[in-house]
Image: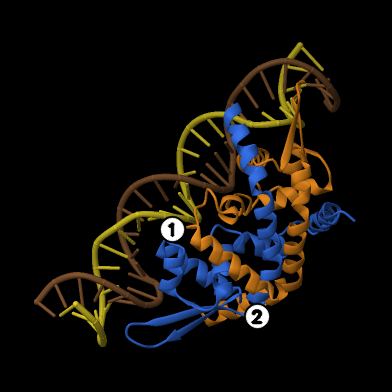
Chain colours: A blue, B orange, C yellow, D brown
Amino acid sequence: MDASVALGAKFELWQTAGLDPDRCPVRGLLDQIGDRWSTLLICALAVGPRRFSALHRLIPDISKRMLTQTLRTLEADGLVHRDVQPAVPPSVTYSLTPLGRSFAGPLLGLVEWAETHFPAVLQTRAQTKRAA
Amino acid sequence: MDASVALGAKFELWQTAGLDPDRCPVRGLLDQIGDRWSTLLICALAVGPRRFSALHRLIPDISKRMLTQTLRTLEADGLVHRDVQPAVPPSVTYSLTPLGRSFAGPLLGLVEWAETHFPAVLQTRAQTKRAA
DNA sequence: GTAACTCAGTCTCAGATAGAGACTTAATGA
DNA sequence: TCATTAAGTCTCTATCTGAGACTGAGTTAC
């Protein structure tokens, strides 16, 4: 069966449940971790545990504000573990939880699709821009 | 091999390329379609072609403004086809392109993960809130 | 006959959100 | 002695999002 058929079937099921963001998994979960930084951070942490400033160096164009905020959301969702060493200067290490690591599978699928089809998308974008 | 290891390896590769959003597939592509509405719209269109107002009825809490904008972005990326029937009243039908349909596979993986692990996430969220 | 509704948007305005960059405290290194 | 580092917070501004009015011709309802 084509995956898009399965996907459509799922959508119709959510429809009957009213698409409530608090109950619909896609809305309640992917709305949050599907932002600009969450997926990138999960990829960065897939390499191994990292300290706050190390993450900031790895992904320079995230602001500290968003880095803090995104990590806190991921922690609240149980995907990331925050380990604070009460020292001076402070030492905080972030790592993926088992739940976070289990997310790597589907995320890898997405990443591979992106890598495969990015050239096609770039081409379409260029055509659209030219037509405009 | 654990998917998280593969994911980490990919991230390190992007690192060496400077993580430039214009060349990195994950940044260039998932930044755009990883927003609140794109994935939901792709799910809705996986059922079959839909007109503008039908989509709006299916997903009532998207504003017309964002519906237009998201569909245009998906069209520019080549995931969605926009078919305008020059009639009065105007008739515009949206459908997934083959590229869009090919995205259903990885997206379905993500959706299934979300459905499986949403209860765990809800539980963690509740604990976090209680502790706060 | 006229008032209301439909199509697929666009437009404006207010409110929410994101980013840039200064600031914190105590210890370390030059 | 001064600068730097750690992990953030705070403020200010810029960008983005949502609500809802508006368009214009045709179709239906009364």
| Apparent side of residue A34 relative to residue B96 in the rendered image (left or right) | left
Write down the quadrant of residue D15 in the picture: top left
Write down the quadrant of residue D21 in the picture: top right
Q: Nearer the viewer, residue A7 or B120?
A: A7
- The amino acid beneath tag 2 is Pro
In the image, residue A33 sits, relative to residue B29, either above or below, namely below
Write down the quadrant of residue A33 in the picture: bottom right
Spot occupied by residue B1 in the image (x, y as percentages of width and height): 70, 76
Q: Nearer the viewer, residue D26 or B92?
A: B92
Q: Chain of mark 1?
A: A
Q: Which residue is mark 1?
A: A61
Between the C-alphas of marks 2 and 1, the distance is 28 Å
Sooner in the amino-acid sequence: mark 2 or mark 1 = 1
Q: Which residue is mark 2?
A: A98
**Element class at badge 2:** helix
Q: Chain of mark 2?
A: A
Q: Measuring 64% from the left and 73% from the top, which residue is drawn there?
A: B4
Q: Measuring 42% from the left and 67% from the top, which residue is drawn there?
A: A57
Spot occupied by residue A26 in the image (x, y as percentages of width and height): 71, 61
Q: Measuring 46% from the left and 70% from the top, which residue is drawn there?
A: A55
Spot occupied by residue A70 in the image (x, y as percentages of width and height): 51, 66
